[in-house]
Image: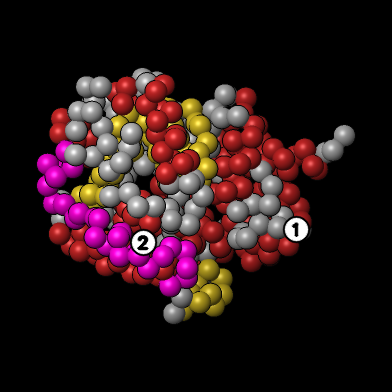
């Protein structure tokens, strides 16, 4: 039974997973080798608990309990009593392999999980002596608010371990778990690649950035168009995930990183966090399009806004169909994952079915 959680890495995701567990009255030990991120995480978690109480999402008593039941650890030895340890350090494969092999020796009975968003689970766990107790738990940011957790069964994950972790996610954390085969990008990052890539190709064909984003919202009913979303995620992060998936799937042309995004990232234009991405920002507010986009994508075609959106959503649907055909996840889980992670009104396979009811 999972009663105490260890989290490796006190960055934004690690602190978020810790706060989620604390709000569900699950004791947490949050580890980081450096004092600075631990100190910052302590501040974020305290503020997060107080905000949740102020908004009546948890009681004041629960907020106080959370503050009293988190340990900020600078030594891995302090995690020896944990029943589940979730690795959430930087996306560096050797670093992940190393820290998991170390924690396995200290917690021989614990379930070990990685929150990687881009690496194969089997690769992350290749240094483990007992890979049967290892799986992927991919949370989405912010973990407290996002309802989805992708659960990835590595080739050697024990069935009982997977079911125990699934019960914890669904019953203790009250999240929706979707089962995913160990494959690059899992469901969401894989299926959504064309959302970003095809939109950039549409711009090369003459579509406008703000016009396509508007069409996505007005025609597709999605909360954010592709360029708005890339700016929010971070162009550098989004590009890194694209490159990882592209290379891991043997470089299919449809998933090839696009020169527009590569050009912007090379200039340090990373989206909202840098003030410049596909759009320009001042004091966090959008003030216009980035003229550097036209340098990389002069665009000489004549796509209409509606045609550009149809091009983008059709590419997403086709990727979802590939994921289904490859047996990566069930039809329902593919649609469920995209709706919950992206807040889309329909999943891509539902989209196709509803567009062609006969």
The 10 Å Cα crowd at callout 1, few under 14, some 14 to 19, many 20 or more, is some
* Residue 160 occupies quadrant: top left
Residue 242 visible in the shown view = no
Q: In front here: 261 or 82? A: 82
Q: Quadrant of the N terminus?
A: top left
Q: CA distance from mark 1 to mark 2?
A: 42 Å
Kindly identify the residue that appears in the image at 16 percent across and 38 percent down: 80
Q: In front here: 353 or 249? A: 353
Taking the image as shown, residue 114 lies to the left or right of residue 169, namely left
Q: Nearer the viewer, mark 1 or mark 2?
A: 2
Kindly identify the residue that appears in the image at 35 percent across and 65 percent down: 61
The 10 Å Cα crowd at callout 2, few under 14, some 14 to 19, many 20 or more, is some
- What number is the disc on residue 200? none
> Relative to 68, is 118 above or below?
above
Check disc 2 and report the residue beneath it. Answer: 62
Q: Which residues are magenta?
A: 54-80
Whether the magenta-drawn stretch holds residue 56 is answered as yes
| Picture coordinates of residue 173, whole percent (x, y) | 43, 46
Q: Quadrant of the C terminus?
A: top right
Whether the magenta-drawn stretch holds residue 311 is answered as no
> Relative to 247, is 267 above or below?
below
* Residue 41 occupies quadrant: bottom left
- What number is the disc on residue 219? 1
Taking the image as shown, residue 244 lies to the left or right of residue 200, namely left
Local secondary structure at mark 2: helix
How are the colours assigned in the image? Answer: secondary structure
């Amino acid at each position: 039974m999972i009663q105490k959680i260890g989290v490796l890495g006190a960055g934004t995701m690690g602190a978020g997973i810790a706060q989620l567990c604390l709000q569900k009255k699950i004791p947490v030990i949050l580890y980081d080798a450096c004092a600075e991120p631990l100190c910052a995480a302590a501040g974020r978690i305290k503020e997060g608990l107080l905000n949740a109480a102020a908004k009546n999402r948890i009681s004041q008593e629960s907020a106080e309990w959370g503050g009293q039941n988190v340990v900020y650890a600078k030594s891995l030895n302090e995690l020896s009593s944990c029943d589940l340890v979730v690795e959430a350090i930087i996306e560096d494969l050797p670093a992940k392999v190393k820290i998991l092999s170390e924690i396995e020796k200290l917690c021989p009975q614990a379930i070990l999980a990685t929150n990687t968003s881009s690496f194969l689970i089997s690769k992350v766990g290749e240094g483990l002596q007992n890979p049967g107790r290892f799986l992927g738990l991919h949370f989405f940011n912010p973990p407290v608010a996002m309802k989805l957790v992708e659960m990835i069964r590595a080739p050697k994950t024990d069935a009982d371990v997977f079911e125990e972790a699934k019960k914890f996610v669904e019953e203790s954390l009250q999240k929706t778990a979707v089962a995913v085969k160990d494959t690059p990008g899992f469901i969401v990052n894989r299926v959504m690649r064309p959302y970003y890539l095809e939109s950039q190709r549409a711009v090369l064909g003459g579509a406008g950035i703000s016009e396509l984003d508007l069409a996505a919202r007005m025609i597709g009913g999605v909360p954010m168009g592709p360029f708005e979303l890339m700016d929010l995620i971070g162009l550098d992060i989004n590009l890194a995930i694209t490159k990882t998936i592209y290379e891991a799937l043997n470089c299919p042309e449809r998933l090839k990183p696009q020169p527009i995004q590569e050009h912007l990232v090379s200039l340090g234009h990373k989206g909202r966090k840098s003030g410049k991405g596909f759009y320009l920002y001042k004091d966090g507010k959008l003030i216009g399009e980035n003229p550097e986009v036209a340098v990389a994508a002069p665009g000489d075609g004549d796509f209409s806004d509606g045609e550009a959106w149809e091009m983008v959503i059709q590419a997403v649907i086709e990727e979802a169909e590939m994921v289904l055909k490859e047996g990566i996840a069930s039809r329902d889980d593919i649609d469920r994952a995209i709706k919950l992670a992206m807040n889309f009104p329909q999943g891509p396979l539902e989209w196709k079915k509803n567009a062609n009811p006969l």
